[in-house]
Amino acid sequence: MVASDYSISVLLLDVLRRVHRDAPGMSLEFRNPSESAPAELEAGEVDFIVNPESQNSPLQSGAILFEDTYVIVVDAGNSEVGDSIRDRPVSCAAPRRLQKRQARSAAFRNLDG
């Protein structure tokens, strides 16, 4: 499976817990996302890719597994950021006090059964 650390922590931890409980002898191999992931899927080297919708290959089918939001709150008087908060390098370099990521997974809601 190809998935980022973020995707694993948001989406797949509950799946992994259930696999561990229901199929303790099963093992999973995770690979980091890369430009070669679609070719690896086509070649049968990986069975599943979790990536942003913008990175989907038009040659492969896909489904939205979860949606998340990322909100950055900045003091309006912050002269270091100003109108450039939309500039990713500037926003990533800014000091942070609190970050909270929130994701909703509709695809895996019924895993408790």
Image (cartoon, rainbow, N blue to C red):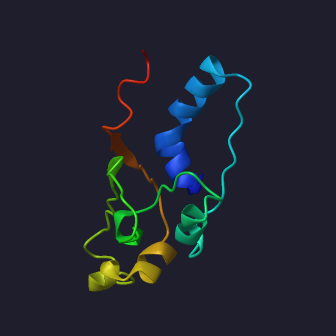
x and y percentages locating residue 100 in the rendered image: 41, 49
Answer with the quarter of the image where residue 84 lies: bottom left
Identity of the residue drawn at 55% across and 36% down: 13
Q: Is residue 51 above or below residue 34?
A: above
Left or right: where 34 falls relative to 76:
right
Quadrant occupied by the C terminus: top left
Q: Observer-nearest residue: 100 or 73?
A: 100
Numbered label tally: 0
Q: Is residue 53 left or right of residue 18?
A: left
Whole-percent x, y for residue 45 in the image: 65, 59
Quadrant of the image occupied by residue 57: bottom left
Please say if 92 is above or below 15. below
Above/below status of 69 relative to 39: above
What percent of the width, then of the height, locates residue 112? 44, 18
Closer-to-camera residue (48/97)? 48
Who's the residue at 50% across and 51% down the image?
A: 7
